[in-house]
Image (cartoon, rainbow, N blue to C red):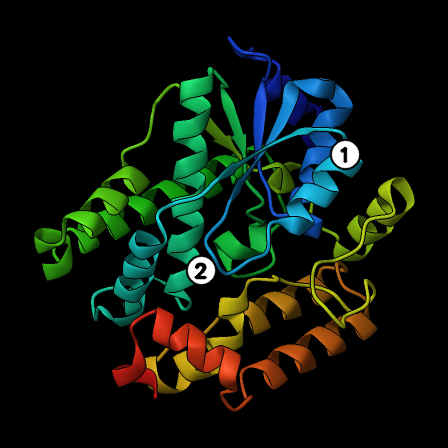
Amino acid sequence: MSLENVFYNKLSEKNGTSKYDCLVLFSGGKDSTYLAHLIKQVKGQRVCLFTVDNSFEDDAQAKKVADQLNLDLFIYKPKVRDILKFYNFLLIDPAIIDLDDNPLCYLCNRYFTSLGMHFADNMGIPFVASGTTAAQIFGTKAQMSERMINIAEEMLKARFDNAYETIKTTQRYKTDCVVKDIVDKMFICPESVSVIHPFLYFGYNISQIKKELQEEYQWENPTPGVSNAEYTTSGCKLTSLFGIFKEKLGFKFHELNEFKLDYENGSLTKEEFEHATSYFKDMISKELNCEMKCIVEKLGLNGQLL
């Protein structure tokens, strides 16, 4: 049986008690849009979309693409002061830095996933779809099979368990009720909801994803001034600070390695790979402008970054 059929069989094992069977963690970018497209092919309108407004990514893209997909979109808005405090913690606590080359994105993604799981549980939705890829899990080329998918899921769980145990040792977790509440919600999730990772089953080909979305929905990427052909990654404004995070906070980042793996796997053309690499290197070498300084101030990091 093909991995695609294994995935669809897995998706049919449970039906929701509400009008939805699956929730897709959604931004309107290429990955989440493609996941929604794949699952909609078998579930139709029993798919919904879930976006977290973290104050650093415009939800206009999510709304626009949700309309193109003709799927219901739910937007969750955490308290701004709470999420800023949480991001501050992820960026400056010394215990966090070794959890991932890019602990901010790694743990923010986990936070968004957990919010989707809690929302799905309240709505009676059994599955949450995440855009995690094999390259992100293994950090190298991997030939996927049912066994490898099981290993990947076990690795994710082990990493999350280790992250939770590490975070629980920090002073901020022990003394700041806002941080503790967010962290506990991140890692203590409802057992009635399963997270599924479609790209482990379908593979991940960026060029093909963009081509199919453009043909099917006339999809456009969310990054101003970047064409669909050049677009590869997030529209979150925090990415503009990656350079100073690297210089001042010791972040290493795995994005360049992922671009290399995607190119070697045939997921990126040579042109896309060269542009993605150049764009990312330019981004992390930029000097701080007024908008970037404003973000630093919002995060409460003037003393650490300016």
Point out residue 255 in the picture as x, y percentages from the top left corner: 56, 69
Point out residue 206 in the picture as x, y percentages from the top left corner: 75, 55
* Whether label 2 touches label 1, CB < 8 Å: no
User: Which disc number belongs to residue 69?
Assistant: 1
Kind of residue at disc 2 = Cys
State which quarter of the image contains the N terminus.
top right
Identify the residue shown where x is 72% and y is 68%.
224
In the rendered structure, the answer to whether residue 66 lies left or right of residue 77 reads right
Whichever of labels 2 and 1 marks the residue nearer the N terminus, that label is 1
Looking at the picture, does residue 37 appear above or below residue 220? above
Q: Residue furthest right?
A: 215
Can residue 202 be seen here?
no
- Of residues 282 and 152, the one nearer the viewer is 282
Identify the residue shown where x is 65% and y is 70%.
260
Sort mark 1 into few (<14), some (14-19) or many (20+) by Cα contacts within 10 Å.
Answer: some
Point out residue 131 in the picture as x, y percentages from the top left corner: 58, 45
Can residue 250 be seen here?
yes
Q: Secondary structure at mark 1?
A: helix
- Of residues 26 and 39, the one nearer the viewer is 26
Looking at the picture, does residue 253 appear above or below residue 68? below
In the rendered structure, the answer to whether residue 185 lies left or right of residue 218 reads left
**3D distance between C-alphas at marks 2 and 1:** 26 Å
Closest to the camera, between mark 2 and mark 1, is 1
Judging by the rendered image, the residue that carries numbered circle 2 is 105
Point out residue 266 in the picture as x, y percentages from the top left corner: 77, 60
In the rendered structure, the answer to whether residue 116 lies left or right of residue 168 reads right
